[in-house]
Image: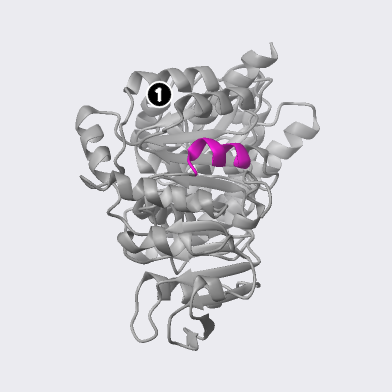
Amino acid sequence: MSDRSDFTRLLAPHAIAVIGASASAGGVANNFLRNLRTLGFPGRVYAVHPAAETVEGWPAVASIAALPEPIDYAYISVAAARTPDLLRAAGGKIRFAQVIASGFAEAGEAELETDLAAACRAGGMRLLGPNCLGLYSSRGRVSFIDGVQMEAGHVGVLSQSGGLGADILRRGQMRGLRFNALITLGNSADLGPAELLRHMLDDPEIHVIGLYLEDVKDGRRFFETLRDAGARKPVVILKGGRTSAGQRASASHTGALAQDDRLWQALSRQTGAVLVDTLNRFLDALLVFQCLSPRAAAPTANVVLFGNGGGTSVLATDAFSRAGFTIPALGGTVLEQLEALHLPPGSSINNPIDVPAGSLRQNRGALGGRIAAAICAAPNIDAIVMHLNMPVILAYLDPEILPNLIKGALDAQAQAAAGGNAKLHFVLVLRSDGELEIEAEKQQYRAAALALGVPVFDELSDAAEALACLAAHELLLFEKSA
């Protein structure tokens, strides 16, 4: 086997063995075999089964020792008590073994986990888990859950919870995240966050990193890895067990001894890793980093809000102010340009810019581009947040209004950048009432915006918190370059 710290064949395996699938009934190992076929895994697959000739259409061998070639990745779903001896008999044929079984963190079972790790070391293999669900890799066409996309992306995630890892994949892809890899780690008896984080920091295909953590056994190494990276890639951390009650839950989940929350806050300040406290904020932060390039020379501070809805504009101003942004009044030639548009009564042009939906629909949404052009010419503006009430906009029955509003804003942004102005961040908020038909159309517009590199959020408060994560990362880069 090659270098123990080389994870290339984990994310792009050539040969996979699945241990624990049934020839006659379903289970997670059977599901994993079906996923490999459905997703078009290009390598070789072997099911290890004592009697069957095939399992789920893949060839079967009687034992790990009978495998005809070295295995890059073994997916192992057998009872915890059987697993150490099974891996001890592998004879050095497995590079990475992912152990799904739980039961290793329960009272009196610590020796079993120690035995499992020793068996892997003796066989020259690296251990993922135990107590996890598997691996997702778009480049390798591997997934531990079904119904996911394989569109290549640049987001890498490490999760110490398998179930939450599945939520991150499913909910993240619905939001527009495109994942490169997601690895569930469970108890981290061998491979832990620090070692895999280093790989993701060095992996040219991964641009943004997300971590769900409950406990990091090698805390010093983890901290030094983040510190030495110098924030060259955004890292977002969702830390479980930040309260005393959460620490008790974490201990029962993975056997973790979660550290004091003050340590994590200090780590965030010293390394630039963004610390969030909910799954929604985690996904939103990854999305804003996926779509927007951090500006080290000019950290985001001043924001212009533009959309329809007076009350919504007031609440938006509150949300962005609470997130640390300034909503500056517009003046000078910018205000003159906006006044020259002769917006209808009821409009407000002094940031937040509030324009009735009926006016935004004029000329099939062209007015939005003219407003955006004026904003982009304003000095000291770092970001535009456009918010639109979907039911109201769609009530005009013109499918081109919303795309034209988005395109107009992006064109104005590009023209300003070509003229020497700093490129502004552009963020879109598509508000909805939850009606199923509206939500279906909203997903289409979300996909179109994301294809243009525009992050889309459901609420203005979500956009404010995500943009604050970007601004915090930019500020660290600015301070490092000063």
For the residue pair 109 and 74, the one nearer the viewer reads as: 109
Residue 397 appears in the figure:
no
At x 61%, y 27%, the residue is 231
User: Of all residues shown, which one is farthest toward the bottom?
Assistant: 53
For the residue pair 331 and 434, the one nearer the viewer reads as: 434
Q: What colouring does the structure picture have?
A: one colour
Rendered position, 386 above or below 92: above
Horizontally, residue 262 falls left or right of residue 143, namely left
Q: Would you call the spot at circle 1 few (<14 residues within 10 Å), some (14-19), or many (20 or more)?
A: some
At x 27%, y 45%, the residue is 253
User: Of all residues shown, which one is farthest toward the top?
Assistant: 482
Q: Position of residue 216 (x, y in %)?
A: 42, 33
Horizontally, residue 401 falls left or right of residue 20, namely right
Residue 232 appears in the figure:
yes
Q: Position of residue 337 (x, y in %)?
A: 64, 28
Q: Which residue is mark 1?
A: 264
Q: Quadrant of residue 243?
A: top left
Horizontally, residue 18 falls left or right of residue 102, namely right
Q: Position of residue 50 (x, y in %)?
A: 43, 81
At x 29%, y 33%, the residue is 241
The part of the chain drawn in magenta is 191-200
Q: Amino acid at mark 1?
A: Trp
